[in-house]
Image (cartoon, rainbow, N blue to C red):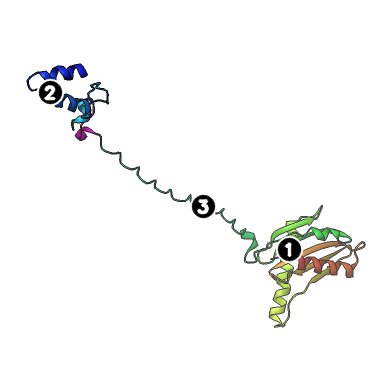
Amino acid sequence: MKLFQRVASVLPGGKKAQAVEEEEDFGGFGPPGGVLWTTPIDVMTDRPKAGAAPVADMPPPAAPDAPVQAQPPAAAPAPAPVAPVPAELGAFGLMSTNISATAMIQGFIGSCLVDSESGLLLASEGGEGMDMEAEAALNTMVVKAETEVIEVLALEDEIEDILITMSQQLHFIRPLEKAPGVFLYVALDKKAANLGMARMQVNRIERSLSM
């Protein structure tokens, strides 16, 4: 490089050439030491680099995801239908017709629970050799007859129980306190039964029937 400067200085316009050389040496186009290097024109200019897509050709930004629509809550399952009250219960709406305790009465033969309006058998227990449906229908006539006696005689009273005493059997008919239109009928062996205890047990069982 120094040899080049000396030769350039003896040529016409040598100072100018030296100045140009010094500018090229120290003007920022290369590192100190005189090694000349060039910067790619893509960096020195405002032109986009080769292969870069123009701004106009760039794809538009992706639209934001649509908000997730909240799902309506699942409908609650429909409640199970309520079973209608059987027609044979009439207006009394009996909730318990369990008369199995009557079998514990001494001398027990059979028993049944009867709707005194229709004579319909609602429940029965025991009664081997007995037609309990016929017993229900016929004892309904007994209750109606006694009720008619009270009405005709204008008695301000009501039936507590009806005791029919036969040579071999005792028959109890007791209308329910909670539903006078329903009665409990119990047939007992007269020789084996204790009349006082049987009546107490029938009364207690009648009160245990829930409406």
Badge 3 is on which residue?
76
Residue at 73% from the left image edge and 74% from the top image edge? 146
Question: From the viewer's perspective, is 52 left or right of 18?
Answer: right
- Report, in whole angstroms, how far the alpha carbon at label 2 lies from the one at label 1: 148 Å
Q: What element carries label 3?
A: loop
Residue farthest to the right? Answer: 191
Residue at 14% from the left image edge and 16% from the top image edge? 7
Residue at 56% from the left image edge and 54% from the top image edge? 81
Under mark 2, the amino acid is Ala
The picture quadrant where one finds residue 26 is top left
Observer able to see residue 194: yes
Under mark 1, the amino acid is Leu
Q: Position of residue 63 (x, y in %)?
A: 30, 41
Foreground of the two, 118 or 182:
182
Foreground of the two, 198 or 8:
8
Which segment did they paint magenta? 49-58
Mark 1 vs mark 3: give the one in front. 3
Mark 2 Cα-neighbour bin, 10 Å: few <14, some 14–19, many ≥20: some
Mark 2 vs mark 1: give the one in front. 2
Residue at 64% from the left image edge and 64% from the top image edge? 93
Check if residue 57 falls in the magenta segment: yes
Badge 2 is on which residue?
17
Q: Is mark 2 on a helix, strand or loop?
A: helix
Q: Is mark 1 on a helix, strand or loop?
A: helix
- The quarter of the image holding the N terminus is top left
Q: Where is residue 108 in the image (x, y as percent from the top left)?
A: 86, 59
